[in-house]
Image (tube, coloured by chain):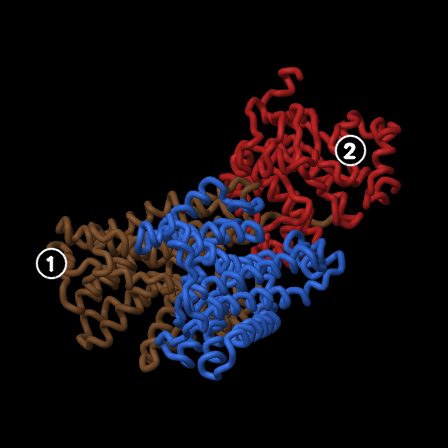
Amino acid sequence: MESFIATGLIGISLGTQYTLLALGFTLIFGILGVVNFAHGGFYVMGGYVAYYCNVILGLPYPVAVLMAMLSMAALGWLFEAFILERVIEDHQATLMVTMGFYLVMATAILMIFGAESPQFPFPVTGVWRLGGIYFPYANMIVLGACLAAIVFVYWLVYRTNIGRGMRAMSEDLPVASALGMRTKALFPFAFALATGLAGGTGALVTPILALAPHVGDSVLAFSFLTVILGGLGSVTGATCAAFIVGLIEAYAAVYLGGSKGALTLFALVLIILVVRPQGLLGREVRRS
Amino acid sequence: MNNRVPKSLPAEIRPSLFSGHDWIALAIVSLTFVIPFTSTNPQVLSQTNLILIAATAALGVYIMQRLDLMSFAVPSFMAIGGYTVALLSMKLQLTDVFVLAAAAFLMPALCAIPLGALILRLKGVYFVLVTFVLTEIVQLLLFEAGPITGGSNGLVGMPAVKIFGMELWDNPHVLLTTCGLAFVSFIITSVFTRWFRSEFAAIETNDVLAESLGLAAWKYKAMAFSVAAGVSGLAGFALVNMLLTAHPSSFAPMSSVNYITYTIVGGKASILGTLIGALLLVSATDYFALSGEMSPGLFGLLIIVVTMVARGGVVGVVSGLLYRLAGQSPPLENGEHYLVVNGEKGQ
Amino acid sequence: MTTQSLSAGALHADRIAKSFGGLKVFHDVSFTVPAGGLLGVIGPNGAGKTTMINIFSGRLGLTSGQVMLGGTRIDGRSTFEIAMMGLVRSFQHTAIFNGHSVETNLLSALRFSRRDRSVLERLSPLLDQFGLIDNWQRNAEVMPYGLQKMLGLTMALATQPNMLLLDEPAAGLEKSERANIDTYVKFAREEFGCGILLVEHDMEIIKRLCPSVIVLDGGRLIAEGPPTDVLSQPHVINAYLGGSDEEDSDVTH
């Protein structure tokens, strides 16, 4: 029973990480109509920026996380404004440039930091225990930070004018433009918000999980799983799906072992595609 | 307006099945048959082998591009084809190259049908996501299904394939097998994509209109997905045959990006682009071998550059220049708008 | 309904209703286009006319009721299936295969509907009059709007349908080009024996061509009969005055 609860806690903390990644991914898709293949790249690079600031430069860890967020937001802004924006009308071209950018980012990391995983330990150690339940402080802090970030995103999307504009655009772009929304200004903003979140997630999570140049691949695959499960473009769907993914992964890792967890998820996604192709909470996705 | 002489319908011009680019591509592929008989240089042999396998694999991307769909599924179907061949030859002692090639094509093609039915009814974006996830699933399955696939050891010790009872075992012979598989794949792909080119072009440009005129778009999409899977399976056969091993690492998920790069950078409008892309980029990877980790970055950069400034890829730019030198404008349909100005999509 | 009107090729809508979520686009609408007949559909914007065409052509499902083509129920079938049964629609905005020549566009229409080139020969007077033969090898995408629209309409006819659904064929055409629509409709009926459901805002065209019209407003069928009679009925006039009709000028001219 204790291990069941402890596994649940791990699952929930995984869920918060996936939520942050999936929210960013979903925002970009919902608002810009772009499948961001570079999303995993921003996550990894965020991890490396935090590592550089914290371990090499010796800055405090919270500052390093902040630096990761800001630098990834800035990079995302530049990428959107100078590259993506120029091909935004052509869905396949957006796919290609984000994929290309991911490859460039991964290679840049490899060239700068090498293929070896750097030593990037979480600054807080120790384990919280209650009866037989163990939960590392590091996971607890990450869980708290991620939850705070999720609340912030929800507040931004549902309670501010910027968020209303973004949602209007994700629902009906022509209407939003007609209403005078500053579309062009919101695109890079939304993109930067999402990549900043990805960078921050990377900074928080990679010390616990793993930091290596190629971890972005699996992050991307899990983001895809989450959005297929939750429904492309749906903020609530992404959140629910991320927790489902996190919990399944955690329980499968403990009770099934190996990569069975991932296989379980894939099977779930296939079932979802058959039964409810628009995802748990998505809108109509069939070709009209 | 009313008193002019009525004009009659212009005479019918029957377009030929293959365009110039198809012929050139087929000619290049058939010329490679010469190499196993004339060269014993292992470097030349292995390089040709790698290029042909890469080009054949990238045909899967090229076929789905006819429908404006970006497929990441090539490694999955290569794996299905490759493991099918390895299992048949090791467990059932089936080594006849024709039997194995048929199996390597049919097995993935059949697997693709239910899968295609599942995802092709969704928007194009879902196709991208699902094919990406699919390569991850297949990779995991290869590791997990140990009793069949040999897990992380793979299937080692395949017997050499035979043609008319003759073993194709040494390096030139292995290349000969690859040449044959590549040639068959190029023939299948060019006949298939050219035969149905009106259908594919119509679905790509305006599927709603095509359906309202009576075209069952999903049939063509499912068919394309299935043929693409079959051709990828042949590439998987060639790869497994070259390595004499079926191993999960040969079908890594991110290798799908390479195949996409070959097709896009070479020029996605014609089959020649896929071949040229594979030729240039595999050679470039080999050339820059000293810093082998660099190749993804190079590929990424090339993809961005091609997408931003030269949508037609290498073949598109070159043939655009040739037309310009000859003082002609490129043909409307055959060449699909090679020179694209200002990064706008030129359709 | 008499059995006669349900004979081969007649299009019959039987108490059809469609709602999106809680929003009723139209409900309880019934009418028949006899085989080879011509029925006009008018109504203010938002009356559900295009939705109706989308349902008949298989792009949308029905909420209740049924649609019959001849003796066969067609609602819920897929677009290409319905097209192969002989019911083909045109689109309000230009719908052609961009980047391809006029010839390829027409040949594609033939190919997809499994017709042969002889249909083109029969269409050639129409193609000539619209100026499509003059532009035979031209990229259809760069032709003037009017030409593109006539190409789209001719492609629908090239499938040799027995029932055509025309969604505002005159919309966006210059006044001088609108005579082409008359030619097209007459040609389709006389040469191909094709029944037509004509959704149109241009009342002059409706009056010239349609022996009979139905009026949709707010998703209900509010009147039917010969156009001049119907248009003089007070509740039809009210529907138009109440609605926001962008093409008002067409009514008054």
Disc 1 element = strand
Q: Nearer the viewer, mark 2 or mark 1?
A: 2
Q: Nearer the viewer, residue B82 or B15?
A: B82
Residue A83, image x and y in percent?
57, 71
- Identified by mark 1, the residue type is Met
User: Compared to A37, does C209 lie above or below?
Assistant: above
Q: Nearer the viewer, residue C179 or C231?
A: C231
Residue at image coords 63%, 48%? C95
Q: What chain is tagged by disc 1?
A: B
Chain colored blue? A
- Point out which mark residue C217 bears: 2
Residue A180, image x and y in percent?
76, 60
User: Compared to C103, does A89 lie above or below?
Assistant: below
Residue A78, image x and y in percent?
59, 74
Identity of the residue furthest to the front in this view: A131
Q: Colour of chain B?
A: brown
Instruction: Tell me the residue that label 1 is attached to.
Output: B166
Taking the image as shown, residue C224 lies to the left or right of residue C87, namely: right
- Identified by mark 2, the residue type is Asp
Residue at image coords 37%, 66%? B275
Evaluate if marks 2 and 1 touch, with contact meaning CB atoms under 8 Å apart.
Answer: no
Q: What chain is tagged by disc 2?
A: C
To the question of a shared chain for discs 2 and 1, the answer is no
Chain colored red? C
Residue A182 picture quarter: bottom right
